[in-house]
Amino acid sequence: MSSTYQNYIGGRFVNDSADGRVEVSNPATQAVLGHVPEASANTVAAAVDAARKAQPAWGRLPAIQRANALRAISAKVRQHRERLAALIVAEQGKTQGLAAVEVDFTADYIDYMAEWARRLEGEVLTSDRPGESIFLLRKPIGVVAGILPWNFPFFLIARKMAPALVTGNTVVIKPSEETPLNAFEFAKLVAETDLPEGVFNLIGGTGAKTGAALTDNPGVDLISFTGSVETGSRIMQTAGKHLTRVNLELGGKAPAIVLADADLDLAAKAITDSRVINTGQVCNCAERVYVDRKVADAFIGKLSLRMAATTFGDPGADASIGMGPLINRAGLDKVRGAVERAVSAGNEVITGGKVADLGQGFHYEPTVLIAKDNDQEIIRKETFGPVLPIVLVDGLEQAVAYANDSEYGLTSSLYTRDLNSALRGVRDLEFGETYVNRENFEAMQGFHAGRRKSGIGGADGKHGLYEYTETQVVYIQHD
């Protein structure tokens, strides 16, 4: 039985007859799960206006009061943990275990950001003039538009909302049209708390209509977007008309380097885990592998066995599987096309390499292939699916050169037992994150930021928190 939702604006669930509707379905079964609004430009404007009206009073509250409001929301999330996780499984295709981790991590993340309430700091600067004090203050930017992806739809609400609210901003959140139901359920939980009207607003809709209206609204002071390079580029162009600030986390093509002295069992497991998590639909997943040819046969054998052993299917029906479906038909076609073109170009499939016919849903087999060189499309373009291309290299220097030869620069990983090699790799890899001898998964206290086309700005930790502030320097002349 499907559900129908309303936009949450100014502390109320509202329905505008001018809004369209978006159908949401299960990618594993293709069953219809519900319908959400497609907010019109007028509805978007109403949400931004509500956030702007609420911001001054919210920003003047002591930060600890804002933190307490966040903690009330995280408590609600924990109370409804199982229901929320089940909904994420249904609409996103995430495995049951990973969906539970996402809900728990979301609640923990909200609490973590709330803890910064008593740690928000300015600076006292030394003046060149006698009798003068200089202070650098951090203040909220204003109204933040948070535009979410579909791959971690629930956690990204918190990643954009929590640092924005604790620093005194108000928000308008637009979830992906592929996975909006969990966000509307989140709004119901917010409505049960005492959060002031207009501080948190949620609108549904497609990127082409609702997202475009939100990014083009001059009442928005910061656009925080997670998604594709193409959409991020369009958002920057639109924001440029109003000189609206942007924070963009975009694509990735994360390299994993396996040196000759690496623990091959560890590397094979960690890289497999980093590829099949969420069916390979994670921007910081391992997307390409560079292995020293001295150990290539042994490593490829271990990796292929692990990838081939990964079970998949409908995560709602089987809690034990390793991965679910791709998000939709377009995602499946993208992965299939990338592999087919790779094969046509002479690259060799070791395992997998085709659509999995399970009768329903958008499933692709876990795939390993050997690429002829570093110039192959399968090496250079983001696949966003359970496909691992491998290139053979002669040592660390060549591996790092190949890794850096990319338009992306989000995450990377390195496997070696040698400390000098590890430190040299960390020094020379041109990526926002590097994981050494472990899977790709960031910590909330870190700073998740990319280089090149992987984005502008970052998230998490102190540095991510301060992305939601602007500075004011005050000069006070006194006796």
Image (tube, helix red, strand yellow):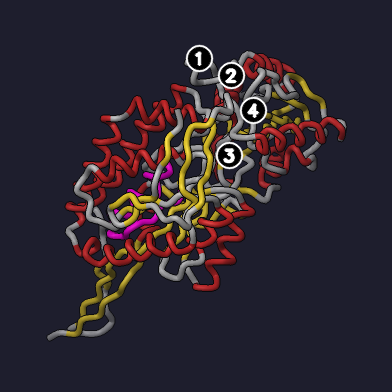
For the residues labelled 1 and 4, the Cα–Cα distance comes to 16 Å
How far across and how far down the image is residue 432, in percent? 53, 47
Mark 3 to mark 2 CA distance (whole Å): 29 Å
Q: Disc 3 marks which residue?
A: 412
The majority secondary structure of the magenta stretch comes to helix
Say which quadrant the N terminus sits in. top left
Seen from the viewer's position, the closer of residues 210 and 355 is 210
Q: Earlier in the sequence, mark 3 or mark 2?
A: 2
Q: Residues within 10 Å of mark 1 (few under 14, many from 20)?
A: few
x then y, percent, for residue 346: 87, 31
Residue matched to label 2 = 313
Q: Is tag 3's residue or tag 1's residue first in the polypeptide sequence?
A: 1
Residue 239 vertical position relative to residue 379 in the rendered view, above or below? below
Kind of residue sitting beneath label 3: Ser
Q: Which residue is mark 1?
A: 318
Give the mark count: 4
